[in-house]
Structures are given as structure tokens and as C-alpha cells.
């Protein structure tokens, strides 16, 4: 049994803050600490309480920096690490011009391994300790992804995209091979260590109705697996989908009529929704995922969070790299703030930080394991430096509350504000970086 203590300012959320004054929604300690035992949070409290409980445990002192649960990114594309920042196109052209050609390279396990190491390094550098990822159509990309996650002991979710039409030949599976590969990968990786497999029909345009039927079988056979896809991101995409599925009542109905909507379903974007689609989301408990940097980058549109919240629909928030423009959940929250501002829905920083941690964990149904600093959860922790840059330090000089400080981090922060990251109790950004990567 190994015991260590992390000391610092400490913030963790218990539920979504109703507003900026909702102090019972979170716990904040000016001099807080976590007792970590075998990678788990054994106890949380003030430093005085924790040292009383474990007087002999070695202490890492992060004061005056701020400890919080590691960030969770609920929608990201692993094979797009070299697609990010590709110029000038909207969704369908962007896919055809930049994304599909790049994803063909992930058939090669050597390439996928190299990219997986680089991808996980980026996640850690930016304070993200859990992500839900689309891999490419190739099994090799999924093996590379989960092998790297296992090496680092990270709670990662992902799956091979199912796609059998409207893409280059080298990216196509078939309804049968997609089913067979997914079933084999679930057997190999799902619930092994901290990994979870996600059934991943890419989107309606790249799957035939026959493949959607196979996805339905996979969903039925694996109720414990999450499902992820894309929904109503772009007007041309929606029109094309309607032409490919003429029987569907609307875009969401393509997924709904194939039994793909349930409480562990994640629907990237969900921007241009019809009233019936909002009703169906509310009825099924499926979760839209807001991808602000991507939606602005591709000119897709403005996600209407308030409309969904009014119906009790809980959304995730995510980077969507490579259409997203930053791995940083701080930058994601910054752009999210601006997208919501345009619609009169200013996001309070307490709500923002809850969303990127506990909120996203709750959307995944994993709040009992990740997303908070609660006892009995994994010690996935980010240490934030609100004075990381000169410009931030200047602004911080005038900050008088925790909320103001959080807003500086949200608007001005990026990987420079990530001072350290713990994964299952191990310092992975700086101190034990090599050990965390497990192979260098
Ligand atoms: N829709 C289908 N595939 C993708 C993708 O890779 N990125 C985005 N942003 N939307 C998609
Ligand atoms: Zn996406």
C-alpha cells in the first residue's frame, strides 16, 4: 500500500451550481489536501485533517495552485491529431479534403502507435485525464489507442468508426466486418482496466441502412457500452442525410429508429434541432455534446444549451479535435462562453468548471469513478496555475474571488496553466512523466 498526500487549494463540485452564489454545489479549501492510496482518493479535507489521518505520508505541496478533478473531453477524434488547423472548409468538404485522407494512414499499426503516444501526451499536457474518442475504421487504430491508455492507466473510452459508404475505399468496412471487428474489439478492450469500448457509427452519411441495422444489433448485445455518433452539425449534412434516409422523420430518427438512443448515447454537435428531435432527446436520455471551437471553426452554428436544459437534457462539452482547434478544455470553455454569450446564455465560471469535470462525468454515467475529488474515486487530478502567463498574473492582481480567478483560467488559460496532472495518483505532466508513458 502506497500513501501520498497532495496539498494545495482544492475545489470539487457536488452538483451543477444553479448560479454564481450556489456555494453548497461545491467544496473549496484554501489549504486543502487529498490522501491518495493506491491511486484512489482515500480522503479529502483540509490539510490539517489529512495530516492527522496520515501523519507519515509524504506530502507534495502545490500551494498556492489550485487542485481540481482532471478534465474530461467527451468528443475527440484520435486520428485527427495531424488534421487540426486545416484551412477553409465547412464540414463535408473538410472531411473529404483533409480528414478522410489522413485517417487512411491509421491502417498501419506503427503509425497508429506513434500517433497514440503523441495524442495522449497532448491530452495530459492540457489537463485532460479522460476522453471519449473516435478511432479510425481500422482495428489497428483501436488497439494502438487502448494499448496506450492501458500503459498510462487512463480511463479512456473509444471505438472504431463504422463507415461503409461515401468515403475513400481504404476507409470503408462492411456491415458484417464492422460488426465482427467491433465485437472482437469489445471482447479485447471493454472494461479491461480503465478502458471502455464505445460503439461508434460515424454518422448517417457514412453508414448504409444495413450498417445501421448491424449497429443496432451491437447496441442490443452490449448495453453496457456507450454509443457515439454525430448529429445535425451542418445544414448541407442534414439535407444530404434526409436524401439518404427518406423514410426518417428527421436526422435524429435515423439513430432512433435503429435503437441507438439511450442514456449512454453521445451525440456530437446537435446544433440544428427540430422540436421533435428535442422531444426525442428528452424522452430517451441521450446526451448532446457541445463542441464550441469546432462549431466556430467549421462555421457550423451555435449550440443552444438553454433550449436543451429547459427540457432536462444534459449536454457534454468537448474539444472535437481535429475540427476543434485546441486540446485545452479551458479554451473549449472559453469559446463555449462566447458561443453562449451570442445567445444571451452567459456561462458562469463555476458552472463551466463543473461542466468540464463532474458534469461530463455525469453525462458518461461515471461520476462514481471520475470527475470529482470525492473519496473512493480515482486520483485523476489537475493542478492549475492562474498566474501562468504575465497577462494572467496582471489580471489576477485585481481578482477578489474564486469565481473571478476561475474566469481568468477559463478565458486566458491553456496548457501553460496546467502545472501538473495526476493519473491514478501518479504525476504525469512533469514529475513522473517518463514512468507514466510507461515505455520511453
Ligand atoms: N461528422 C462525421 N465525422 C466527423 C468528424 O470527423 N468531425 C466532425 N466535426 N464532424 C463529423
Ligand atoms: Zn466529431
Image (spheres, rainbow, N blue to C red):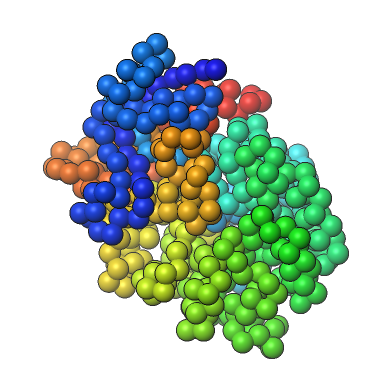
Quarter that holds the N terminus:
top right
Is 303 above or below relative to 390? below
Quarter that holds the C terminus:
top right
Front residue of this view, candidates 83 and 348: 348
Q: Name which quarter of the figure residue 382 lies in.
A: top left
Total labels drawn: 0
Residue in the image at 37% along x and 38% along y: 68
Q: Position of residue 263 (x, y in %)?
A: 57, 63
The answer to whether residue 411 shows anywhere in this view is no
Q: Is residue 132 left or right of residue 427?
A: right
Q: Is residue 55 left or right of residue 315?
A: left
Q: Position of residue 164 (x, y in %)?
A: 78, 68
Q: Is residue 21 left or right of residue 127?
A: left
Is 36 above or below relative to 399? above
Residue in the image at 77% along x and 44% along y: 188
Q: Position of residue 239 (x, y in %)?
A: 60, 84
Q: Residue furthest top?
A: 56
Residue in the image at 30% along x and 68% along y: 345
Residue in the image at 50% along x and 30% along y: 40
Q: Name which quarter of the figure residue 225 lies in.
A: bottom right
Is 46 above or below relative to 237? above
Front residue of this view, candidates 379 and 346: 379
Q: Position of residue 437 (x, y in %)?
A: 60, 29
The answer to whether residue 322 shows anywhere in this view is yes
Amino acid at each position: 500500500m502506497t500513501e501520498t498526500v497532495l496539498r494545495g487549494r482544492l475545489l470539487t463540485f457536488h452538483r451543477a451550481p444553479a448560479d454564481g452564489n450556489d456555494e453548497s454545489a461545491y467544496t473549496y479549501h484554501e489549504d486543502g489536501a487529498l490522501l491518495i492510496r493506491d491511486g484512489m482518493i482515500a480522503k479529502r479535507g483540509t490539510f490539517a485533517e489529512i495530516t492527522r489521518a496520515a501523519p507519515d505520508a509524504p506530502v507534495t505541496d502545490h500551494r498556492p495552485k489550485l487542485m481540481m478533478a482532471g478534465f474530461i473531453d467527451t468528443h475527440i477524434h484520435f486520428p485527427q491529431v495531424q488534421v487540426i488547423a486545416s484551412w477553409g472548409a465547412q464540414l463535408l468538404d473538410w472531411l473529404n479534403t483533409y480528414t478522410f485522407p489522413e485517417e487512411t494512414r491509421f491502417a498501419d499499426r506503427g503509425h497508429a502507435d506513434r500517433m497514440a503516444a503523441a495524442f495522449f501526451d497532448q491530452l495530459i499536457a492540457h489537463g485532460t485525464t479522460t476522453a471519449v474518442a473516435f478511432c479510425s475504421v481500422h482495428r489497428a487504430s483501436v488497439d494502438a489507442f487502448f494499448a496506450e491508455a492501458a500503459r498510462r492507466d487512463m480511463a479512456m473510452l473509444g471505438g472504431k468508426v463504422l463507415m461503409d459508404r461515401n468515403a475513400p475505399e481504404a476507409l470503408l468496412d462492411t456491415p458484417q466486418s464492422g460488426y465482427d471487428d467491433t465485437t472482437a474489439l469489445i471482447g479485447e478492450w471493454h472494461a479491461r482496466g480503465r478502458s471502455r469500448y464505445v460503439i461508434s457509427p460515424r454518422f448517417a452519411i457514412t453508414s448504409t441502412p444495413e450498417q445501421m441495422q448491424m449497429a443496432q444489433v451491437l447496441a442490443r448485445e452490449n448495453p453496457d457500452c456507450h454509443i457515439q455518433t454525430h448529429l445535425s452539425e451542418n445544414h448541407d449534412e442534414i439535407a444530404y442525410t434526409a436524401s439518404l434516409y427518406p423514410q426518417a422523420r428527421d436526422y435524429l430518427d435515423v439513430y432512433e429508429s435503429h435503437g441507438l438512443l439511450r442514456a449512454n448515447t453521445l451525440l456530437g454537435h446537435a446544433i440544428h434541432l427540430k422540436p421533435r428531435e428535442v422531444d426525442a432527446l428528452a424522452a430517451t436520455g441521450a446526451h448532446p455534446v457541445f463542441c464550441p471551437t469546432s462549431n466556430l471553426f467549421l462555421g457550423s452554428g451555435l449550440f443552444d444549451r438553454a433550449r436543451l436544459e429547459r427540457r432536462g437534457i444534459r449536454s457534454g462539452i468537448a474539444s472535437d479535435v481535429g475540427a476543434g482547434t485546441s486540446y485545452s478544455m479551458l479554451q473549449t470553455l472559453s469559446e463555449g462562453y462566447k458561443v453562449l454569450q451570442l445567445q444571451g446564455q452567459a456561462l458562469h465560471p463555476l458552472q463551466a468548471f463543473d461542466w468540464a469535470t463532474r458534469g461530463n462525468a455525469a453525462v458518461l454515467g461515471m461520476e462514481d469513478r471520475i470527475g470529482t475529488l470525492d473519496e473512493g474515486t480515482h486520483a485523476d487530478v489537475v493542478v492549475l496555475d492562474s498566474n501562468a502567463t504575465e497577462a494572467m498574473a496582471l489580471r489576477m492582481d485585481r481578482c477578489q474571488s474564486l469565481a473571478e480567478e476561475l474566469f481568468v483560467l477559463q478565458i486566458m488559460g491553456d496548457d501553460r496553466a496546467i502545472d501538473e496532472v495526476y493519473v491514478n495518483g501518479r504525476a504525469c505532466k512533469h514529475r513522473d512523466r517518463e514512468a507514466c508513458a510507461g515505455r520511453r
